[in-house]
Image (cartoon, rainbow, N blue to C red):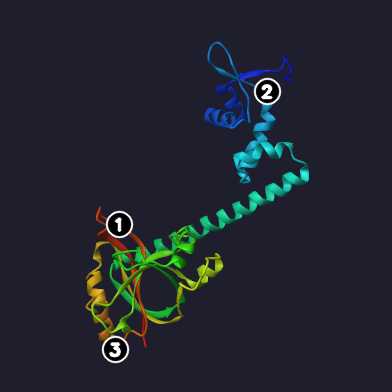
């Protein structure tokens, strides 16, 4: 029972004294974690003794404890509370890992984009890290394979570490070459972050590759040019005496499309294994 002599505070004052917002107090009250008294004036008043509980809630929230678990934690034994806290902190660690990965990827893109401001179209020949790709569409329809959809959500949740892109096989021997749109990720990233790999996922081994960078509105040619081996990157490869020696990947870092999903501006690169 609350001591009748205990101080009570209007919602705005109580929020200020506790370093929270009135909306914080209302939300936690709606969840059954706080109580208020509503006077005839219409204002909510909170008893002083709830100040300690609010500090507990802030600590638990910052440790990743969901609201639904906070009430039960207050009535648990110390050991039970610590065990539940550890579970919440494991989830927090995973979230920090994800956010750190996103920041690292954006920093890589920022440096790459600064180079593209000088040279929107550029190329190089370098060692390509092994890649995994998860087929998804043939550009006209979804690929009907249950193995894809068993792991698709896990892959897409790691974008932009995982990227969208296109895969073309120059050895198919037909024109235009069939196109598969896929999710693509470096093998080292997939293994580091525990992305699921099943029998539908394909691996392109590490190899020497021709890398063709493009940025903004400066991407020459079209997907049809790529599929018909008429894209400017092939011309540059021929000038260098290079021939494709495996599947061609188009990896998209970022793109903006119109309402019909036509590319408006695109940032990314082609990776072409070469002999």
Of marks 2 and 3, which one's residue comes earlier in the chain?
2
Height in image: 58 above or below 145?
Answer: above
Q: Residue at x 77, y 46 (%)?
A: 79
Query: Which residue is label 1 attached to?
Result: 256
How far apart marks 3 and 1 lie (CA) works out to 34 Å
In the figure, residue 51 lies in which quadrant? top right
Height in image: 27 above or below 188?
Answer: above
How far apart marks 2 and 3 lie (CA) works out to 80 Å
How far apart marks 1 and 2 lie (CA) works out to 53 Å
Of marks 1 and 2, which one's residue comes earlier in the chain?
2
Percent across and percent down for residue 184 are 42, 68
Quarter holding the N terminus is: top right
Query: Which residue is label 3 attached to?
Result: 241
- Report if the CB atoms under discs 3 and 1 are less than 8 Å apart: no
Height in image: 223 above or below 54?
Answer: below
Of marks 3 and 1, which one's residue comes earlier in the chain?
3
- Residue furthest top in the image: 40
Quarter holding the C terminus is: bottom left
Is 13 placed left or right of 240 in the picture? Answer: right
Is 216 placed left or right of 34 in the picture? Answer: left
Please tell me how crowded label 1 is: few (under 14), some (14-19), or many (20+) other residues with Cα within 10 Å: few
Percent across and percent down for residue 264 are 25, 58
Please tell me how crowded label 2 is: few (under 14), some (14-19), or many (20+) other residues with Cα within 10 Å: some
- Under circle 1, the secondary element is strand
Q: Residue at x 61, y 39 (%)?
A: 68
Height in image: 2 above or below 268?
Answer: above
- Under circle 3, the secondary element is loop
Which of 253 and 240 lies nearest the eye of the viewer? 253
Percent across and percent down for residue 168 are 32, 76
Q: Is residue 251 visible?
A: no
């Amino acid at each position: 029972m609350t001591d009748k002599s205990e101080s009570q505070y209007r919602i705005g004052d109580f929020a200020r004294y506790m370093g929270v917002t009135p909306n914080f107090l209302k939300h936690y009250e709606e969840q059954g974690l706080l109580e208020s008294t509503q006077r005839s004036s219409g204002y909510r008043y909170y008893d002083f003794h709830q100040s300690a509980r609010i500090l507990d809630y802030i600590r638990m929230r910052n440790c990743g404890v969901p609201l639904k678990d906070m009430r039960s934690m207050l009535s648990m034994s110390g050991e039970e509370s610590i065990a539940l806290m550890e579970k919440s902190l494991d989830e927090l660690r995973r979230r920090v890992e994800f956010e750190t990965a996103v920041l690292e990827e954006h920093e890589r893109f920022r440096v790459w984009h600064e180079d593209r401001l000088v040279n929107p179209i550029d190329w190089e020949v370098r060692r390509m890290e092994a890649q995994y790709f998860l087929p998804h569409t043939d550009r006209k329809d979804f690929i009907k394979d249950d193995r894809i959809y068993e792991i698709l959500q896990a892959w897409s949740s790691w974008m932009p570490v995982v990227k969208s892109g296109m895969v073309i096989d120059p050895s198919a021997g037909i024109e235009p070459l069939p196109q598969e749109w896929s999710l693509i990720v470096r093998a080292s990233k997939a293994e580091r972050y525990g992305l699921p790999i099943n029998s539908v996922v394909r691996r392109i081994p590490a190899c020497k590759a021709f890398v063709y960078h493009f940025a903004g509105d400066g991407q020459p040619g079209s997907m049809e040019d790529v599929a018909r081996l008429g894209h400017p990157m092939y011309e540059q490869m021929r000038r260098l005496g290079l021939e494709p020696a495996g599947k061609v990947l188009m990896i998209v870092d970022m793109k903006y499309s119109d309402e019909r999903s036509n590319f408006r501006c695109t940032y990314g690169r082609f990776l072409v294994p070469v002999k």
